[in-house]
């Protein structure tokens, strides 16, 4: 399977704990995006990387959230001191943006987080 | 502020009927408009996309109609099937930037 993969698929944690999610993009893709999706809503942009550089962060991304893409391949999203409001599906998408081409984002299956 | 407004929130269609989902935007910098299909527990999957230099794009039973002057675009699903039952999201982006998604339409196709 050469699609976007995410791990874990489900995570249940207690309020105040830290959690980390991993995303493995399609191998030749240079862009990687993190989104958050709550029930009945569309994905909301959190942040994105081009190679290892984090180019943009949403205002939704509080200082409890941090994302890394150390070698321009996989990425991690960490949430510190989780709150019940962090419960959501966290989606990763990757794309290959080349000059003159149209970017298409391919999504992973998501990590569903439940904070008790 | 919702950058892309999508309607209806839910839609019920008989098998063989036409499903129509509408989206509107304000940002004239948007130049790529994809539609995604999402099944429960899965990530969104690209269905079809259009650029504003064309008014219509068709792929199989799926058609996007685009009205640049009205800043509206819609998805038409012809001959709707029960397997099309899913949530559909429109999105828009200025090329090379983040995607803005609509709030989704839950489609149910009744056999």
Image (cartoon, coloured by chain):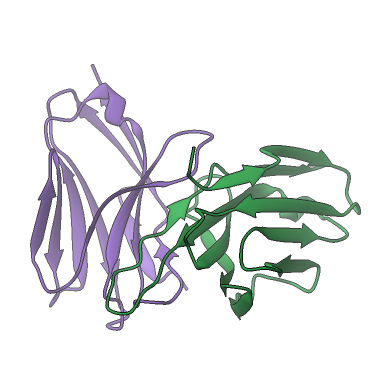
Chain colours: A green, B purple
Among the 4 quarters of the image, the one containing residue A66: bottom right
Among the 4 quarters of the image, the one containing residue A111: top right
Question: Between residues B2 and B78, which one lies in front from this camera angle?
Answer: B78
Image check: A9 left or right of B41?
A: right
Residue B84 percent location from the top left of the image: 28, 31
Q: Quadrant of the C terminus of chain A?
A: top right
**x 52%, y 48%: residue:** A4
Q: Is residue B16 depicted above or below B21 in this figure?
A: above
Residue B13 percent location from the top left of the image: 21, 30
Image check: B16 left or right of A86?
A: left
Question: Between residues A20 and A26, which one lies in front from this camera angle?
Answer: A26
Among the 4 quarters of the image, the one containing residue A32: bottom right
Q: Is residue A106 depicted above or below B39 in this figure?
A: below
Residue A82 percent location from the top left of the image: 83, 55
How many marks the image carries: the answer is: 0
Q: Is residue B34 depicted above or below A63 in this figure?
A: above
Question: Between residues A34 and A60, which one lies in front from this camera angle?
Answer: A34
Residue A102 percent location from the top left of the image: 29, 69
Q: Is residue A110 depicted above or below A16 in this figure?
A: above
Image check: A10 left or right of B67?
A: right
User: Outermost residue toward the right?
Assistant: A16
**x 88%, y 49%: residue:** A15
**x 36%, y 74%: residue:** A98
**x 68%, y 70%: residue:** A61
């Amino acid at each position: 399977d050469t699609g976007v993969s995410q791990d874990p698929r489900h995570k249940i944690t207690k309020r105040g704990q830290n959690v980390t999610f991993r995303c493995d993009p399609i191998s030749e893709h240079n862009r990687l995006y993190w989104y958050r999706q709550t029930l009945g809503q569309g994905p909301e942009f959190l942040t994105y990387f081009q190679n290892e550089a984090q180019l943009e962060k949403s205002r939704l991304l509080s200082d409890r959230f941090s994302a890394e893409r150390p070698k321009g391949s996989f990425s991690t999203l960490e949430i510190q001191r989780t709150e019940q409001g962090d419960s959501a599906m966290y989606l990763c998408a990757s794309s290959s943006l080349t000059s003159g081409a149209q970017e298409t984002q391919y999504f992973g299956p998501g990590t569903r987080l439940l904070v008790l | 502020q919702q950058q892309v407004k999508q309607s209806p929130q839910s839609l019920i269609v008989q098998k063989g009927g036409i499903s129509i989902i509408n989206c509107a935007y304000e940002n004239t910098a948007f130049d790529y408009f994809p539609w995604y299909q999402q099944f429960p527990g899965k990530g969104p999957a690209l269905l079809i996309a259009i650029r504003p230099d064309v008014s219509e794009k068709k792929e199989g039973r799926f058609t996007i109609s685009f009205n640049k002057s009205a800043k509206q675009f819609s998805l038409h699903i012809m001959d709707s099937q029960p397997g099309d039952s899913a949530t559909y999201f429109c999105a828009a982006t200025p090329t090379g930037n983040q995607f803005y998604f609509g709030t989704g339409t839950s489609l149910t196709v009744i056999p």
